[in-house]
Amino acid sequence: MARILVLGAGFAGLWAALGAARKRDEIGARAADTEILVIDRNAYHNIRVRNYEVDLADVAL
């Protein structure tokens, strides 16, 4: 079995895993033959909205 390991589950890591799954489907490989594994230090995906701004007190979410 082939294994694709993606380190990091940020946006780039998730897109890499999705792209690998898409390519696996395009070439006709079975999911059982290729494992795509995403590893991250957190058990969740953190979406940081507008955290680049200095003062977030007036930001409505």
Image (cartoon, rainbow, N blue to C red):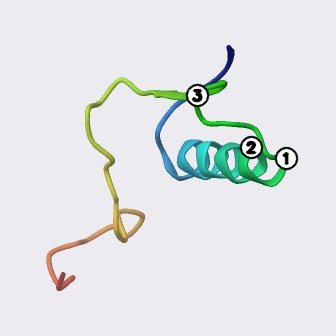
Q: Which residue is mark 2?
A: 24
Q: Which residue is mark 3?
A: 32
Percent coordinates x, y for residue 51 in the rendering? 35, 63
**Which one is in front, 25 or 8?**
25
| Residue 50, above or below 10 | below
Q: Which of the two labelled residues, at mark 1 and mark 3, occupies the earlier sequence position? A: 1
- Report the residue at 61% width, 52% height from top: 15
Measure the alpha-carbon separation of dots 1 and 2: 6 Å
Query: Farthest top residue?
Result: 1
The C terminus is located in which quarter?
bottom left
Q: Quadrant of residue 32?
A: top right
Measure the alpha-carbon separation of dots 2 and 3. 11 Å
Whether label 1 touches label 3, CB < 8 Å: no
The numbered mark, 2 or 3, whose residue comes first in the sequence reads: 2
Label for residue 27? 1
Give coordinates of residue 35: x percent, y percent: 59, 25
- Real-space Cα separation, disc 1 to disc 3, in angstroms: 14 Å
Local packing at callout 1 (Cα closer than 10 Å; few below 14, some 14-19, many 20+) is few
Question: Pointers 1 and 2 in contact (CB under 8 A)?
Answer: yes
56 up-or-down from 7: above or below: below
Q: Secondary structure at mark 1?
A: loop
Left or right, 46 with reference to 36: left
